[in-house]
Image: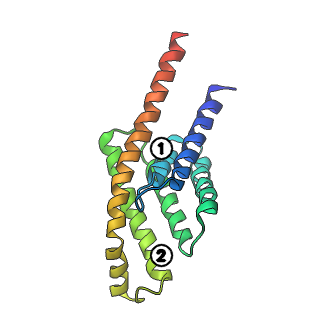
Amino acid sequence: MNQNRIQVSILITIVIVLAFLRLVPHPPNATPIAAMALFAGAFFTNRTLAFVIPLAAMVLSDMLLGFHSTIWYVYAGVATTVLIGGALKQFNAMKVGAAAIVASIIFFLITNFGAWLYHDMYPQNYNGLLQAYVAGIPFLRNSLIANLIFSYLVFYGFSSFLSARLAHTSLQ
């Protein structure tokens, strides 16, 4: 097996593990989903895989968690986060943090729009949309914290792994 195939296998494994961490008990919206999508966008050189693997992992985990009326908004948020990750050609702590924050806010805007549109609890007007966004603020806070922590862990964990692997390969 060549080194590129090994790396793609590792990337796929990391994405799937992060998606399935949704099944572990956690505070609302405190999952590594944005980190997973940012990571896929940043590290998969094959742009198709960058989208397909995270979305497939989400569908698989949703098969266990259950689907809901706004699931397409969640998937749109994940796909948008992959795009944000793809913009991270080179990264540092500031860029990863900024990407995690931007991804959190965009995901919040997309999914709460879906909640407003599909749930009867909000009037279908501007005030109802604002109510949906205000109601989602506690979830946004949890997402921001989790996205920052998981993004730093996965980006720097994988980078450290690659550095160690390169050092080991050059010693041989």
Let me know if residue 45 appears in the view. Answer: no
- For image coordinates 33% across by 53% down, the residue present is 145
Let me know if residue 2 appears in the view. Answer: yes
- Residue 27 in percent (x, y) is at 40, 59
Q: Is mark 2 on a helix, strand or loop?
A: helix
- For image coordinates 34% across by 56% down, the residue present is 144
Q: Residues within 10 Å of mark 2 (few under 14, many from 20)?
A: some
- Residue 18 in percent (x, y) is at 52, 47
- Residue 29 in percent (x, y) is at 42, 61
Label count reads: 2
Question: In the picture shown, does residue 153 fall above or below 57?
Answer: above
Query: In this figure, which residue is indicated by the disc labeled 1?
Result: 42
Name which of mark 1 and mark 2 comes first in the sequence: 1
Disc 1 or disc 2, which is closer to the eye? Answer: 2
**Mark number for residue 114?**
2
Give the residue type at disc 1: Ala
Q: Quadrant of the C terminus?
A: top right
Q: Which of the two residues, 66 or 72, is positioned nearer the viewer here?
A: 66
Question: In the picture shown, does residue 63 fall above or below 53?
Answer: below
**Mark number for residue 54?**
none
- Residue 90 in percent (x, y) is at 40, 38
Q: How crowded is mark 1: few (under 14 residues within 10 Å), some or many (20 or more)?
A: many
The quarter of the displayed image where residue 68 is located? bottom right
In the picture, measured across the screen, residue 9 lies left or right of residue 162, that is: right
